[in-house]
Image (spheres, rainbow, N blue to C red):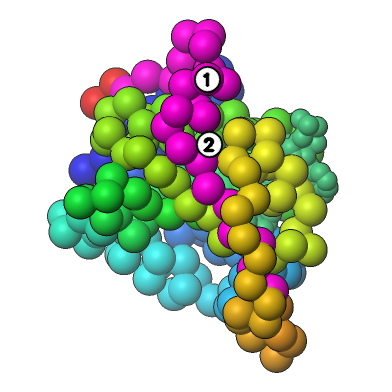
Amino acid sequence: MPPILRTGRLILRPFENDDAADLLRVFAEPDVVRYWSSGAWTDIAQAEAMIAEARQAYRDGGLARYAIALVGTNRLIGICNLRGFFEQNRRCELGYALGRAYWGQGYAAEALEGLLDHAFHVLDINRIEADIDPRNEASARLLEKLGFRQEGYMPERWIVHGEKADTAFYGLLRRYWDERTALPSSAHATG
Ligand SMILES: CC(C)(COP(=O)(O)OP(=O)(O)OC[C@H]1O[C@@H](n2cnc3c(N)ncnc32)[C@H](O)[C@@H]1OP(=O)(O)O)[C@@H](O)C(=O)NCCC(=O)NCCS
C-alpha cells in the first residue's frame, strides 16, 4: 500500500472503494478527458474498475495511483500516479487529472510537488517522464512550473477521439528537482 502523503491543503492517499462516485464525477466531465485516449465516463462501473486496478497494483507494484483528496473532507477531487517503473534505470512516468471544478487553484501543482518529492527522495527515482498533448496548455504549464523540461516532440503519436494527436515529451531529473527545491519539502509521508 503506498504511504499517505500530506501537503498544506491536500491528502494523497490510496483509493478507497467508496471513492467511486467522486471518481466518476471527475472523469464524466468532457473537459477533463479532452486530451485522453478514452471518452468521458458514463457509468459507475468505470470508476469501480479504476479503483480495482489501483488496489490490485498496490499488491503487485507497477502502478502507484493516488487519490487527491481535500484535507477538510477527505473526498477525492482528482488522481495522480507513477507508473512504468524501470528499476534498473530508476525511472517512471507521471499522470494526473483533477475534477473540473477544482482547476486553477494551484491544487495540481501542490499535489504533484508532494508526489514528486516522495518519488525522488523516498522511492529513489532519478528521472520522471510525462507525455502530453502539446495543445494541453494547462498540463504543459503545470509541468514547466514543476521543473520539467521539454525534451522531444513526436507528431501523430496518438489517435485521440478519432483525431491524430502529437506528443510533447517532458522529463524531470532528480538533480533539477533538488536545484529547484533548495527549500524544505512541503510534503511528508505518514503511513
Ligand atoms: C492539467 C491540470 C491537472 C491542471 O490542474 P490545476 O490545478 O488547474 O493546475 P494549477 O492550478 O496547479 O496550475 C499550475 C500552473 O498551470 C497554469 N495553468 C492552469 N490552467 C491553465 C490553463 N488552462 N492555461 C494555461 N495555464 C494554466 C497555472 O496558472 C499555474 O501556473 P502559474 O502558477 O505559473 O500561474 C487540469 O487542468 C486537469 O486536470 N486537466 C485535465 C486532465 C489532463 O489533461 N491531465 C493531463 C493529461 S497528460
Query: For the point 40% across and 65% down, which residue is it?
Result: 50
Q: Residue furthest front?
A: 151
| Residue 87, position as x, y percentages in the image | 21, 51
Which residue in the structure is indicated by mark 1? 179
Closer to us: 90 or 27: 90
| Residue 131, position as x, y percentages in the image | 57, 61
Res. 103 mark: none
Disc 1 residue crowd, few under 14, some 14–19, many 20+, Cα 10 Å: few
Judge whether 171 appears above or below 70 on screen.
below
- For residue 141, say whether it is visible: yes
Secondary structure state at the residue bearing disc 2: helix
Direction from residue 113 to residue 39 in the image, left or right: right
Query: Quadrant of the image for the N terminus?
Result: top left
Judge whether 162 appears above or below 69 on screen.
below
| Residue 116, position as x, y percentages in the image | 45, 34
Residue behind label 2 places its C-beta within 8 angstroms of ligand 1 = yes
Which residue in the structure is indicated by mark 2? 112
Judge whether 85 appears above or below 113 on screen.
below
Query: For the point 35% across and 38% down, which residue is it?
Result: 126
Residue type marked 1: Glu
Inspect the magenta stretch and tell me whether residue 177 lies in it: yes
Direction from residue 117 to residue 148 in the image, left or right: right
User: How far is mark 1 from mark 2, CA to CA?
Assistant: 17 Å
Direction from residue 122 to residue 78 in the image, left or right: right
Quadrant of ligand 1 in image = top right
Please provide the residue range marked out in magenta: 166-189
Residues at discs 1 and 2 in contact (Cβ within 8 Å): no
Residue type marked 2: Leu
Query: For the point 68% across and 77% down, which residue is it?
Result: 155
Instruction: Report the number of discs.
Output: 2
